[in-house]
């Protein structure tokens, strides 16, 4: 690689770091809270930080804490994480068209760092996103998430035991906080959440299946039913319009 190419990549990397600062600031309270809740859920600081390093997905990590509290098995947790993060297939496909051509190895490395926030930053950037820029954005976002997780766990460890135990309520508050903005944007999300809650209640109270599988099954069933309704509505309005 020529000196010019190296210099260009270095400049793009710095631009990526600068673009990722806003993401790092945004991750600060969420990762801090995750680390604190992970501590109150019984995870060690090593387990908490390792989860953030390997998973690097906020909503999925919060859900995992809830499932772990229920004593859910690893298969259900992995499957739930897959369902929650399935949107990453679409985001990765979209960014593949936005990013410059490069070795598959480089693309595999920076694709790990794709989140809702990094996707938004890269997708709205004018022109082609270089490999250096991608690494810069993702590195800062990833580092801040992992570091603040550890800090949150340390803060949680310093809290009185009574307060640590009561922090479990914050986990549910966080789920509500994640859900409400989506509810404001789409009525479809409201029906999806309500239907999933109904299914989960039936499955758990009725003793049909364990808590972990109930969550997974409820999520899949509600998503499939809502999408079927959307397809039926689209076809109905299409036929009606033709008439």
Image (cartoon, rainbow, N blue to C red):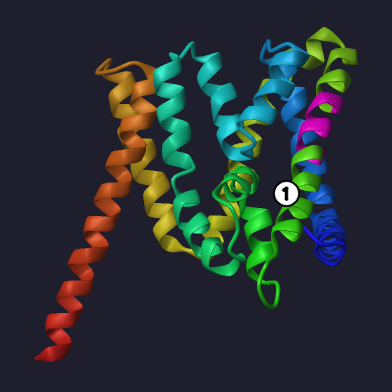
Q: Vertical placement of 4 versus 75: above or below?
A: below
Location of residue 119 in the rendering, given as x and y in whole percent from the top left corner = 63, 58
Please, which residue is most extreme toward the front here?
2
Location of residue 98 in the rendering, given as x and y in whole percent from the top left corner = 58, 68
Please tell me which residue is depicted at 58% across the width and 52% down the height of the picture.
Answer: 103
Please tell me which residue is depicted at 52% across the width and 57% down the height of the picture.
Answer: 91
Location of residue 125 in the rendering, given as x and y in whole percent from the top left corner = 70, 72
**Numbered-mark total:** 1
Q: Quadrant of the rendered structure where residue 150 is?
A: top right
Q: Is residue 131 magenta?
A: no
User: Circle 1: is it few (<14), some (14-19), or many (20+) Cα within 10 Å?
Assistant: many
Please, which residue is most extreme toward the bottom here?
243
The secondary structure that dominates the magenta segment is helix
Please tell me which residue is depicted at 58% across the width and 63% down the height of the picture.
Answer: 101
Residue highlighted by disc 1: 138
Quadrant where the image shows the N terminus? bottom right
Q: Which residues are magenta?
A: 144-151
Q: Helix, strand or loop at disc 1? A: helix
Q: Is residue 148 magenta?
A: yes
Quadrant where the image shows the C terminus? bottom left
Q: Nearer the viewer, residue 225 or 48?
A: 48
């Amino acid at each position: 690689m020529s000196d010019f190419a190296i210099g260009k990549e270095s400049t793009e990397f710095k631009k990526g770091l600068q673009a990722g600062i806003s993401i790092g600031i945004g991750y600060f309270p969420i990762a801090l809270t995750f680390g604190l809740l992970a501590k109150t859920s019984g995870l060690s600081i090593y387990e908490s930080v390792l989860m953030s390093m390997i998973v690097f997905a906020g909503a999925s990590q919060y859900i995992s804490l809830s499932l772990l509290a229920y004593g859910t098995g690893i298969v259900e947790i992995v499957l739930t994480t897959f369902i929650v993060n399935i949107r990453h297939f679409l985001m990765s496909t979209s960014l593949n068209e936005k990013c410059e051509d490069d070795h598959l190895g480089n693309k595999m490395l920076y694709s790990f760092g794709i989140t809702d926030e990094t996707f938004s930053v890269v997708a709205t950037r004018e022109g082609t996103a270089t490999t250096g820029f991608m690494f810069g954005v993702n590195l800062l976002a990833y580092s801040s998430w992992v570091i603040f997780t550890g800090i949150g766990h340390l803060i949680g460890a310093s809290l009185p035991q009574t307060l640590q135990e009561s922090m479990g309520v914050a986990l549910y508050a966080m789920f509500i906080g994640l859900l409400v903005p989506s509810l404001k944007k789409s009525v479809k999300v409201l029906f999806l959440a309500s239907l999933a809650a109904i299914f989960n209640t039936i499955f758990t109270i009725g003793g049909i299946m364990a808590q972990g599988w109930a969550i997974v099954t409820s999520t899949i069933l509600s998503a499939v039913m809502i999408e079927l309704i959307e397809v039926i509505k689209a076809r109905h309005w299409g036929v009606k319009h033709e008439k």
